[in-house]
Image (tube, helix red, strand yellow):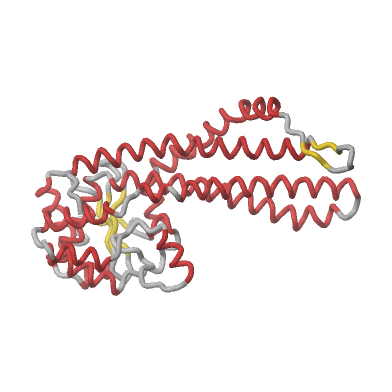
């Protein structure tokens, strides 16, 4: 594997974060334009000499309406993103059920984290604990105030000090490399689009349930209800396309970040074999009961559903941001 320095990785992650910040509004605006164009084309149809309906799209009207709506779309998404971005710590805690601890609560894990931060010269992050017997851990945050290392109670109970130091070193390397900032940016983007898709789907469902029954009462109501359903379907398709593009942001989160975090963790703890042993133990029991969100799950040192073998896990692995655990262990054992 080609060696990449920590500063190079930081620059790479910063560039990708900026690229995502630029691409996401472009994707959203593109979907808005497509939605307006399709709706305009549906409303401007006429019949040719053969009696066939022909769609006549008024591009000037579409562009005018788009320029009117675009600033509000940008403002709304910008405010939404800012709130989610700067409240990421609370968002992650709520999604995982993690609780912050102090030295008094658990001197062992606190001292391990503190010693490793002193070794690499970085500020002390917040330490969170998830009350779960399974083994896993992750890092999160966008700045020194929100940087956090989260571990499960199962991880602390079943790993010795050297193994736990290797896992903590891995997570601290994610923070040093700015991997966490890139992940949070991706999580916020995907969350915005998935929420919009849910809203459109719910509106469509309500139109079928409530609009459909009332539309049977009159032809006008039927036509109006049918038109609303078509418009909602178009909106749903546009939102689905936008969601697909935001999923592509996972490809920006290279699997190499895990290899680099492993190397950094092994360097910090001074014992690559201890981290390899920790990964082997975690890989046997990574599942967590409270992780229902894929965007949060991708933050863990090993995916919580890594042992799950079904059709959904197959498709998820195609977009996986984690390399095979066996390969990671082999590389560590070669140090």
Q: How many marks?
A: 0
Q: Position of residue 280 (x, y in %)?
A: 23, 71
* Picture layout, residue 170 above or below residue 35: below
Please tell me whether residue 238 is drawn above or below residue 23 in the rendered image: below
Within the image, what quadrant is residue 108 found in? bottom left
Q: Position of residue 229 (x, y in %)?
A: 74, 50
| Nearer-the-camera pick, 318 or 225 | 318
Q: Residue furthest front?
A: 50
Q: What residue appears at the point 61 percent right and 35 percent down from the top-left corner?
A: 33
Q: Position of residue 139 (x, y in %)?
A: 28, 53
Q: Tell me the residue at 16%/66% (across/down).
A: 163
Quadrant of the drawing holding the C terminus: bottom left
Q: Quadrant of the N terminus?
A: bottom left
Residue drawn at (50%, 35%) of the image: 26
Residue sitting nearer the eye, 168 or 298: 298
- Name the residue located 73 percent from the left edge and 48 percent from the top edge: 230
Residue 275 horizontal/vertical position (percent): 17, 64
Lateral position of residue 52 relative to residue 209, left or right: right
The one nearer the camera, 335 or 270, is 335
- Residue placed most toward the observer, 320 or 85: 320
């Amino acid at each position: 594997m080609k060696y990449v320095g920590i500063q190079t990785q930081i620059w790479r992650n910063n560039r990708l974060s900026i690229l995502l910040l630029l691409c996401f509004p472009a994707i959203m605006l593109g979907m808005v334009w497509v939605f307006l164009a399709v709706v305009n084309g549906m409303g401007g149809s006429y019949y040719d000499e053969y009696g066939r309906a022909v769609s006549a799209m008024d591009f000037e009207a579409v562009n005018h309406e788009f320029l009117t709506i675009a600033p509000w779309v940008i403002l709304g998404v910008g405010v939404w993103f800012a709130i989610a971005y700067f409240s990421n710590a609370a968002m992650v805690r709520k999604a995982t059920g993690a609780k912050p601890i102090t030295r008094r609560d658990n001197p062992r894990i606190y001292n391990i984290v503190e010693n490793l931060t002193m070794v690499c010269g970085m500020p002390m992050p917040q330490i969170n604990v998830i009350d779960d017997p399974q083994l896993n851990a992750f890092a999160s945050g966008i700045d020194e105030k929100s940087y956090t290392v989260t571990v499960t109670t199962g991880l602390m109970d079943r790993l010795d000090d050297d193994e736990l130091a290797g896992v903590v070193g891995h997570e601290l390397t994610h923070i040093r490399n700015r991997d966490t900032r890139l992940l949070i940016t991706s999580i916020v983007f995907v969350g915005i689009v998935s929420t919009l898709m849910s809203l459109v789907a719910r509106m469509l469902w309500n139109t079928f349930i409530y609009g459909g029954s009332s539309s049977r009462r009159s032809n006008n109501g039927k036509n109006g209800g049918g038109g609303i359903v078509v418009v909602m379907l178009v909106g749903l398709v546009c939102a689905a396309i936008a969601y697909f593009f935001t999923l592509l942001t996972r490809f920006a989160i290279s699997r190499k970040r895990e290899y680099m975090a492993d190397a950094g963790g092994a360097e910090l703890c001074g014992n690559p074999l201890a981290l390899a042993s920790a990964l082997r133990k975690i890989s046997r029991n990574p599942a967590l009961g409270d992780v229902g969100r894929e965007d949060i799950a991708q933050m863990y040192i090993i995916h919580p559903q890594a042992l799950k073998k079904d059709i959904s896990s197959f498709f998820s692995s195609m977009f996986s941001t984690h390399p095979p655990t066996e390969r990671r262990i082999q590389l560590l054992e070669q140090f």
